[in-house]
Image (spheres, rainbow, N blue to C red):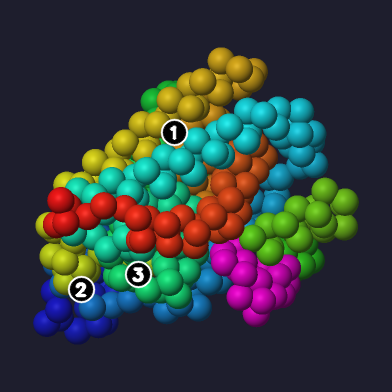
Amino acid sequence: MAERSPIFQWVILLTLSLLLSLVMLHFHIPAAMLLGPMVVGVTMSLFGATVRIDNRFFISSQAILGCMIAQNLSSSILVSLAANWPIVLSILLATLFASGMSGWLLVRFSNLPGTTGAWGSSPGGAAAMVAMSEEYGADVRLVAFMQYLRVLFVAGSAALVVRIAMGGEAQSVVQELIWFPPLGWDFVATLALAIIAGWLGRRLRFPSGTMLFPMLIGAGLHAGDVLTIQLPEWLLAMAYAFIGWSVGLRFNRAVFLLALRTLPQIVISILALMSLCALMALALTKVLDMDFLTAYLATSPGGLDTVAIIAAGSGVDMSFVMAMQTLRLFSILMTGPAMAKFISRHAPRKAES
């Protein structure tokens, strides 16, 4: 694949991504426009593809995604979170503890450096974790591999859980999509929100700010009836595809071979963290009046963007899912550096025992 021209690689990437997405849509798989490009990107990259997504497209897609989340957020979720703060806090602390233990065990039973294991196992926004890890001396290639491998696992499992839980309802959700609605000033204002708020988040160098700023500002404007957010399905599909390609094409062969020695430990740590979050979701349904699907996506240890895409097409309580995911991202951002430093200094190494 590396010997092929970039134009040929782009044609193959676009064609296969479209075909696989259409097949997934036909079988009513949630987040088909994300998973199709992601799977094709991973496959092509491992076969030596050299094309990459320009970071500007990835950033723009995250800003659009922030607006989509803002469209589904409501002020009522703050009342719900405040009323159930002991449970919410318990879930956040349990996830932090699990990610820290996962990083500790990875360092203990593999050859991963301490900071790399800590940042790679942190269940926050994948892009934010990769960016911050480089500042703290971790091997950014391995951190990216661990983060996006977990995103791939979580996206696949979450889509499967949604498909099983929704059953025949998945078909009606897909059929209700209007791909090319009439556009007006609301669409122009939404684009302006994405551009200005996304630029502000990036300008202030806030981790995941490109998505969080449009999300928070847009939610305030939308809830106050100042702005009606309008995002046509074709624009969302493009944003999903760019995010899927950005994730998939990071799995290049060189990084895969570098991580091959520790791949079993990495996969086990990902599956263990996913299992723990699923158990927390089950417990959440027993304590709160909530369906398992909402609880599962709220506690799912994937990237904020991929979970948002899956949740958007599954009929869950989007406000609660995004509130929990955002709170966890903030908690990881605040505790990540200290956790990485602690594991790097104190975790026993296998080679030393």
Residue 49's label in the rendered image is 2
The residue beneath circle 3 is 138
Of circles 3 and 2, which is in front?
Answer: 3
Looking at numbered disc 3 in the image, what kind of residue is underneath it? Ala
The residue beneath circle 1 is 277
Screen quadrant of the N terminus? bottom left
Of circles 2 and 1, which is in front?
Answer: 1
Please say if 166 is above or below 37.
above
Q: Which of marks 1 and 3 is nearer the N terminus?
A: 3
Q: Is residue 90 visible?
A: yes
- Residue at x 72%, y 57% (from the top left corner): 216
Residue 132's label in the rendered image is none
- Residue at x 17%, y 71% (from the top left corner): 254
Residue 57, percent from left and from top? 49, 74
Please say if 347 is above or below 186.
above
**148 and 183: which one is in front?**
148
Q: Distance between the residues labelled 1 and 3?
A: 26 Å
Q: Can residue 184 be seen in this view?
A: no
In the shown orientation, is residue 64 left or right of residue 2? right
Q: Which residues make up the magenta segment?
A: 192-211
